[in-house]
Image (cartoon, grey):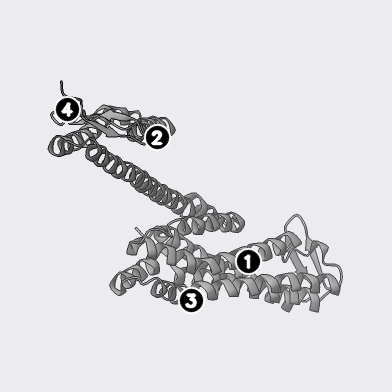
Amino acid sequence: MTAPDTSPTDSGKLMPKPDPNERDVEAHRFGLHPLVASLVGLYFFLIIGGTVFVAIWRDKMDLFDGLFVSVVVSAFLIGVPSWIVWRITRSRLAGNITCTVLVGLMISFFFVGIYSTSSVAKKNAAWKTFDEQSKELSSSDLLERLIDGEDVTMEAADKLSKYIDATDSLAEDTSDEGKAIVAFGAAMRPIQVKVEAYAIATAAYMESGGVVPTDLNTIEDIQIRKGILDNAIITTRELSDAYAGLIDTFESEAQARGIDRDFRNSYVRKIRYSAAPDLIADIKATELRIWDIQVNILGMYEERLGEWNYDVEDEWVEFSRPEDNKRYDQLLTQWDEADADGVVLKKELQARFNPNMN
């Protein structure tokens, strides 16, 4: 009787050698290592859980329609290549490595897709906000109230601020149009600061009474009123100058952002017409004419203090000297003319103004 073949072990015991005729069991079945199986489970959890979360969060239940297909396709793309590698190599290790690589790629694509989707959603939301604020800023109601003589400066300043913030939200848009809008917003930012200063100064003057002399009893009262008016004049002139320089400021901002020259020139033409900076500067020029007339009226009050009376009911100032009444009437006529010129310009602005440049 022949003794069985033996081989030494670490413990020093003799163990039978494996039968060389036995075939490797791993060559007959394919199985996933527990870690690889966990990775596969994580991937399917991500695509299923992610779909459910996005569908509920963004109220897009139609995403569920493609969920089953996504799961089946993913299982095919992961399982079939891994099985083929195992069949060719007869190595469970090779099959597990293939599966791991494929799942890793799938998870990477999953997160890239989430990032891309998030970026697109963020971009779309930014454009939506920009369009909404453009419509708000160019509101016909606001311009109609302006034409009717209502003081809408503070409201306009607030809308302009929100509009500029909306242009800033497009900073990640790399298209020429997106960069042009951001450049336009940057060019409008100094104007927005001037608009706010102008709104505060003109509101302060109107609240003081303007040229209504009810509270103007002394030289000091008149000089204080004139000082408030001077501030309104300064801010109006600064705002007019800012609008007059809008095109140059935009071109500097556009060049700094590398916008194509032809597109930049095209956008400048749109700004000239739709944002109408020159027209707005002309409107401010008519306001400066009115301010200058009011300076003269306050000057008459100061120069002829004690020689005029104010009729509260008729809202009329009567001077003692005929020549002063004549001069006063002339100033009021000039005021009406400047105001009429301003209304014409404001109506033209209403027809043209469109900060969205469409």
Which-is-in-front pick, marks 4 and 1? 4
Farthest residue to the top: give it: 1
Q: Residues within 10 Å of mark 4 (few under 14, many from 20)?
A: few
Report which residue position mark 4 lands on: 28
| Disc 2, SS | helix
User: Which residue is under mark 3?
Assistant: 245
Q: Secondary structure at mark 3?
A: loop
> Callout 1, which amino acid?
Tyr
Residue at mark 1: 198
Q: Is residue 246 above or below residue 348?
A: below
Kindly report the distance in space between the C-alpha atoms of the residues bearing marks 4 and 1: 85 Å
Q: Residue at x 18, y 34 (%)?
A: 83
In this image, 327 relative to 345: left or right? right
Closer to the camera, 260 or 288? 260
Q: x%, y% of residue 231?
A: 69, 72
Q: Earlier in the sequence, mark 1 or mark 2?
A: 2
Vertical placement of residue 69 versus 329, above or below: above
Badge 1 density bin: few <14, some 14–19, many ≥20, Cα 10 Å: many
Residue 141, position in %: x, y?
Answer: 50, 49
Which of labels 1 and 3 is toward the front? 3
Q: Which numbered marker is on residue 54?
A: 2
Tag 1 or tag 4, which sits nearer the N-term? 4
